[in-house]
Amino acid sequence: MSAQYVIIIYMKILGIDPGMAIVGYSLIEFEDDKIELITSGSIQTEKGVRESSRLLEIFNDMTTIIDKFKPDVCAIEKLFFFRNRTTVMPVAHARGVILTVLEQFGVPIYEYTPMEVKQVLTGYGRADKKEVEQMVKFALNCENLPKLDDTIDSIAIAICHTRSCINQPVMV
């Protein structure tokens, strides 16, 4: 008689939508094909404050979040193209600070472009925000999502990573 093995995938995934003004974050638990939202929120920095102070705030808040929730991995939005040249550098700086904190804690980092996230969640890489939001609701089996788009995007990024782990599209 041969032994049969069941592989159970379990992990806590930190999803991050980086930004200078708003960093959306979420933590989901993923076990087999079940996804549960543990927490979500945003880090909001004040306009008009020195960029270095805003980056320090992001650094400190990300440190607190990672220390408190101890994620197994992080899925973060990858910058690949930006229409607005005035915001690309501050977002890149914020993303760099976030990557530094993740590295400091030894959290493995997985990067996804917005198009990849949309493709995985909706099957269409140019889906709009409402379509992504609907698929996030479906994946979490809930109707009430956070109000901020940045936070919803962080959840979508984390869900994208779950699909990459099991190489399975979202089924409707």
Image (spheres, grey):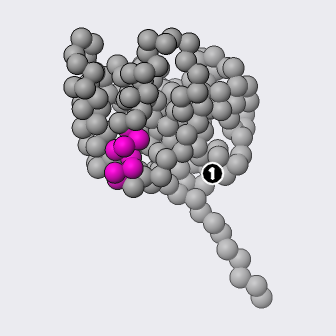
Q: Position of residue 60 (x, y in %)?
A: 24, 38
Residue highlighted by disc 1: 165
Residue 89 painted magenta: no
- Residue 24 seen in the figure: no
Q: Residue furthest bottom?
A: 1
Q: Position of residue 143 (x, y in %)?
A: 52, 26
Residue 104 painted magenta: yes
Q: Which residues are magenta?
A: 98-105
60 above or below 2?
above
Which quadrant of the structure image shows residue 127? Answer: top right
- Left or right: 47, with 148 as reference point: left
In-front residue for pair 81/33: 81
In-front residue for pair 43/122: 43
Q: Position of residue 172 (x, y in %)?
A: 72, 33
The main secondary structure of the magenta stretch is helix
Which quadrant of the structure image shows residue 120? Answer: top right
